[in-house]
Image (cartoon, grey):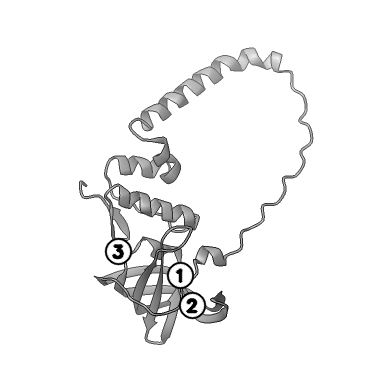
Amino acid sequence: MIKCQGTLRIKKIRQSRNGAFCIADLATDFGEFKVKDPMLDQFEEGEYQGTVWISEIYMSQYISYGKAVTELRARLHDLQVDSEDRKPVRSNEHSEPDPIDEVPTPQVPPKASQKPATRTNWADMRGNRLGKEATSVSEKDAGQAVAQAGQSTGDIELFGQELATQIENHQAVKLDPTVDRVLFRKQTAGLKARGYTFDSKQQTWIHPGA
């Protein structure tokens, strides 16, 4: 792990089929690196100065317009922003590929065949369990109904129950950049559509009505 001071020059790319994403040039005392981590996707364009924790430095190559492009990348473990200057970043560089498209889709292993379960005499057990199960299911359904009141199914599917509740109450929200990157981008876009803005120093989404 490398801890150092650095400047991130973040640029937003909008032409991806997976939604807009961000990349950055990281300038440090010991070199300059490309950064294409998911956590950048919630930032706005501009220059950000602060402390970075680098977990890995590695060479990466991709094809752009028929040419091989090799670059030195840094993978960030964490980032603490001390100051920011949000402004459009203009670049004459080649078109950047979406980092999602650089990662091969993992193959899902086939499900192992299961042996038939041992047959159970449900008739003997039903009388003992029916009343208990009915009470348990009823209480669970009632609790979920109360928790989800006022929340749309779409919010719960996109953010999960806990975050959906915070959003419903206009509370501060902190996203997890380690989730699937497509989902992370949808969550970011969803928060913007709901009036949230990103506080880069706290790395938290804030609602104006909070």
Residue corresponding to mark 3: 200
The residue drawn where x is 74% and y is 22% is 120
Could you say which disc has been placed on residue 73 in the image?
Answer: 2
Could you say which disc has been placed on residue 36 in the image?
Answer: 1
Q: Which kind of residue does numbered mark 3 sit on?
A: Ser
Q: Which residue is nearer to you in this view: 63 or 140?
A: 63
For disc 2, the neighbor class at 10 Å (few under 14, some 14 to 19, many from 20) is many
Specify whether 103 is left or right of 85: right
Disc 2, SS: strand
The image position of residue 112, as x and y in percent, is 75, 44
Q: Quick check: 93 above or below 138?
A: below
Q: Which kind of residue does numbered mark 1 sit on?
A: Lys
Q: Are marks 1 and 3 in contact (CB under 8 Å)?
A: no
The residue drawn where x is 67% and y is 52% is 108
Whether residue 161 is visible to the viewer of this picture, yes or no, is no
Q: Are marks 3 and 2 in contact (CB under 8 Å)?
A: no
